[in-house]
Amino acid sequence: NAGVMQNPRHLVRRRGQEARLRCSPMKGHSHVYWYRQLPEEGLKFMVYLQKENIIDESGMPKERFSAEFPKEGPSILRIQQVVRGDSAAYFCASSRTGGTGELFFGEGSRLTVL
Amino acid sequence: QKEVEQDPGPLSVPEGAIVSLNCTYSNSAFQYFMWYRQYSRKGPELLMYTYSSGNKEDGRFTAQVDKSSKYISLFIRDSQPSDSATYLCAMSPLTGANSKLTFGKGITLSVRP
C-alpha cells in the first residue's frame, strides 16, 4: 500500500470551497483509478485514467467533480463547491495493466466538509 | 436489489476460530472475484483473487466461488488477533475488469485473544 501515495491524508473544507486530492501511482504503473467510500457504504468506482487520458468516468458525478492525470505529476481529483455529502474517504489505486492486474490502493484522503 | 450483498456484521470470534465471510451477487457477468482486507484508516489490500468457480487456498485463507448460486466465501482458519480488520468482497466482469470493480459494503471482524 505504501507504494501509492495520496495527499493530503485529511482535508477539511467549508461548503462551497474546492478540494484537490492528489495521487502518485506506484512506480511503473500507468493506470490510475479513483474510488470513493462513503460512511457505511462500500467502495464505489469513480474514474479510470491513464496518462493524459480519461478512460472511464462512468462513476463520476456529472457536476463539480473532475479528474486528470497529466503527463508529468500526480493524478488529481478535484471537487468544486463542496457540499456535506462529499464527506468521504477517497482512495486512489494503480495497476500495471488495465485489465485484470492487481490493484494497489493508497491509504486514502479523508475529506470532511463543514 | 444491490449487485453485491455482504453480511453487515460486525463479527467477533475468539482466537483460533474458523471464520466464514460471505457475499452474494446478482450480476451473472461477474467472472473475477476478490477479497480485500482493510485495516482501520488504511487502504484495502488484495487478499485473494479467483477466476470463475472453485476453491483457492493460500495459507490460512480459502476463497470459494459458486457461480451457480452467485455466492462467494472467504474462510479463515486458526484466526489471529492480527486478522482483525474489515473484509471487502469485490467482483468484476471479464473485460475492463479494474474499472468495473463492484465492492460489497464490508464486514468488520474482531478476533479476541
Image (spheres, rainbow, N blue to C red):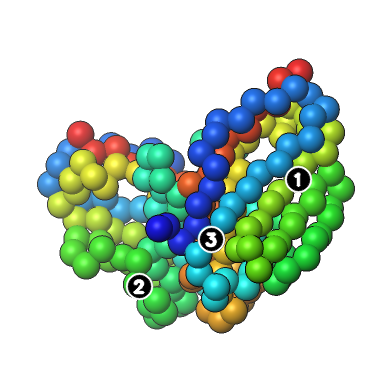
Q: Give the letter of the chain under mark 3.
A: B
Disc 3 marks a residue whose amino acid type is: Tyr
Find numbered disc 3 in the image and state the secondary structure of the residue it sits on. Answer: strand
Image quadrant in which you'd find residue B63: bottom right
Mark 2 is surrounded, within 10 Å at the Cα level, by few (under 14), some (14 to 19) or many (20 or more) other residues, namely some
Left or right, B36 with respect to A114, comes to: right
Left or right, B42 with respect to A110, comes to: right
Mark 1 is surrounded, within 10 Å at the Cα level, by few (under 14), some (14 to 19) or many (20 or more) other residues, namely some
Looking at the image, which residue sits at the far left?
A16
Disc 2 marks a residue whose amino acid type is: Glu
Find numbered disc 2 in the image and state the secondary structure of the residue it sits on. Answer: loop
> Looking at the rendered structure, which numbered label has been put on residue A57?
2
**Residue A71 versus residue B43: which sits nearer the camera?**
B43
> Measured from the top left, where is residue A38 in percent x and y?
37, 45
Q: Mark 3 points at which residue?
A: B25
Q: How far apart are marks 1 and 2 (CA)?
A: 34 Å
> Measured from the top left, where is residue B73 in percent x and y?
69, 52
Q: In which quarter of the image is the C terminus of chain B?
A: top right
Left or right, B57 with respect to B24, comes to: right
Same-subunit check for callouts 3 and 1: yes
Q: Mark 1 points at which residue?
A: B75
- CB contact under 8 Å: marks 2 and 3: no
Q: Give the letter of the chain under mark 1.
A: B
Same-subunit check for callouts 1 and 2: no
Q: Which residue is drawn at the image coordinates 64% and 25% (left, top)?
A: B12
**Residue A104 versus residue B46: which sits nearer the camera?**
B46
Mark 3 is surrounded, within 10 Å at the Cα level, by few (under 14), some (14 to 19) or many (20 or more) other residues, namely many
Q: In which quarter of the image is the N terminus of chain B?
A: bottom left
